[in-house]
Image (tube, coloured by chain):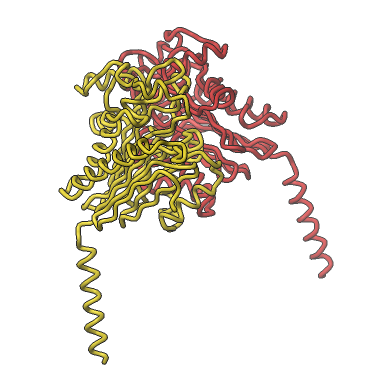
Chain colours: A red, B yellow
Amino acid sequence: MKHTCLIALIGLLWLSSSLSAQPKYALAVHGGAGADPAHMSREEIAGVETRLQAVLRQGLAQLKAGRSSLEVVETAVRSLEDDPWFNAGRGAALNSAGEAELDAAIMDGSNLQCGAVAGVRRCKNPVSLARFVMEKTPHVLMVGLGADRFAEESGLEMVDNDYFITERARQALRKKQGTVGCVALDQQGHLAAATSTGGLTGKRPGRVGDSPIIGAGTYADDRGCAVSCTGVGEEFIRRQIAGQISQRMRFNGVSLSESVKLTFADGLPDDVGGVIALNRQGDWVLHFNTVGMSRGAADSQGRFMVAIGKDK
Amino acid sequence: MKHTCLIALIGLLWLSSSLSAQPKYALAVHGGAGADPAHMSREEIAGVETRLQAVLRQGLAQLKAGRSSLEVVETAVRSLEDDPWFNAGRGAALNSAGEAELDAAIMDGSNLQCGAVAGVRRCKNPVSLARFVMEKTPHVLMVGLGADRFAEESGLEMVDNDYFITERARQALRKKQGTVGCVALDQQGHLAAATSTGGLTGKRPGRVGDSPIIGAGTYADDRGCAVSCTGVGEEFIRRQIAGQISQRMRFNGVSLSESVKLTFADGLPDDVGGVIALNRQGDWVLHFNTVGMSRGAADSQGRFMVAIGKDK
């Protein structure tokens, strides 16, 4: 009887170690908080879901092929920037002067390297410019004309400001909060995060939200977690939401889900936004205090989900 | 014998309560990390010290008169902005195109309200513009042309970019890191922080450092502490230095000095900068890992100090 138990135990240990030896990777994406599926047409819901599914599948394929989480979050956010359905890159919300001003950030959790841009008007893919700032300069954040000039010098694709302004954005009478973001864990066990946005509809020219602020809207640290936020940026900046979620894990040893819960409970007003967060174990949390958040996540174990409204 | 003890105890309790009932206030200022007093003339050392003493005295008088810490940090930083000796406002370091681009932030620890500006070229006092962003807009951060335009609309004093460019800045061949900052505790027990800078000498146009990034170079939270940083901004952004110092106190219950020590030990490279930090008890920590940091602090108990080199 004792021997049977021992053999069963050894079998279990072998099984669990072989499972954990499997290449493990995961990613999560968001297309902004605030959308209410009750006020969206079937076509709109299907349109968002189909797009997020495509981005997840593309990211899974890259991760399976051994690509870095940094590359995966950049590619995912680029795809969402190029798609006029989201408030980032093409399709960006317009400021009060009717222009697009774009913000983006990217961060590598393996070494805390990061790059960000704000108030960009002509660089087609702000998230790629953020990566250039990270890799080709000693700087972390570049803004305004200087950022666009750097993009041009670096040979990134430039467009007229009109490129970003789509019929969809022009007609966006309803409050639009379709910031996009991605967090990923690669086979090497490294985390990365990226976020990109056109900001608030009707914002003052020059206003910058949390997306390009490292520690506010975007953060990644292998010792904690990777986070991308969406919502009323000002509330995320003053409370360092993305960084706080990672730091609570590091400083207090709480779990990812506990950390997200504690951070939201720490004075964040109701109905301001949401986060996607991922740790090195491949656990994800997609949390929001708005009526909805366009989101999706998938991993090497076969989990795959997209949703807009609250979890059932 | 027992009675004598009891009376002594009551006396002690009365004494300590009357001491704590004294109006208690404090402030600390910095004029940048990196300066080496061994390479400064006597006149230069005296010049910096005299200026910091004047700012401290002015702040003490305001605090004694019951003014808010928010007002005190704004006034102190304005004075340092107006003084061409420091790398903020007039006297700002110039970017690679020979222009001044100014950054500043301010934060109220009583309610986490905050404001910041980056890449400003014509507003005379960026710290006051940061306060306007905090108080007159729903936003936290404004950058570039939009920020200058908002300053103009708000009736703040505007100047030509040439105003900021002094002979001193033009001749700054040596690495100059004279960011300025102030933290204060008022009689109402509230903390505030402000920071202002011209950034790195020869920076790319558009580059923004940690000063205007809430949680990186500037943070204030009555539940933790008030912090203003100076140094290589990129290192302070990626590690959320100002916010981290406050959050370690809140999350882990460590003292201010312990929190500063832990934060610096958490991967911050050598020789990158320093911080001034102040808690609600009026304890201050002026810490740096460079060869020097122009700094000073004073309080209602009569403590008053300024220094540049390491503590003896």
Residue at the right extreme? A3
Residue A53 versus residue A228: which sits nearer the camera? A228
Quadrant in the rendering for residue B214: top left
Residue A15: where, in percent of width, then height?
A: 77, 51
Is the residue B205 above or below the residue B39 in the image? above
Is the residue A13 above or below the residue B103 in the image? below
Residue B235 versus residue A198: which sits nearer the camera? B235
Residue B23: where, in percent of width, then height?
A: 20, 57
Is the residue A150 above or below the residue B270 in the image? above
Quadrant in the rendering for residue B163: top left
Q: Is B46 on the left or on the right of A294, as rendered?
A: left
Residue A124: where, in percent of width, then height?
A: 51, 14
Q: Is A15 on the left or on the right of B11, as rendered?
A: right
What's the residue at 51%, 27% (across, down)? A139
Q: Is B244 on the left or on the right of B23, as rendered?
A: right
Image quadrant where one finds the N terminus of chain A? bottom right
Residue B140 versus residue B287: which sits nearer the camera? B287
Residue A155 versus residue A229: which sits nearer the camera? A155
Quadrant in the rendering for residue A33: top left
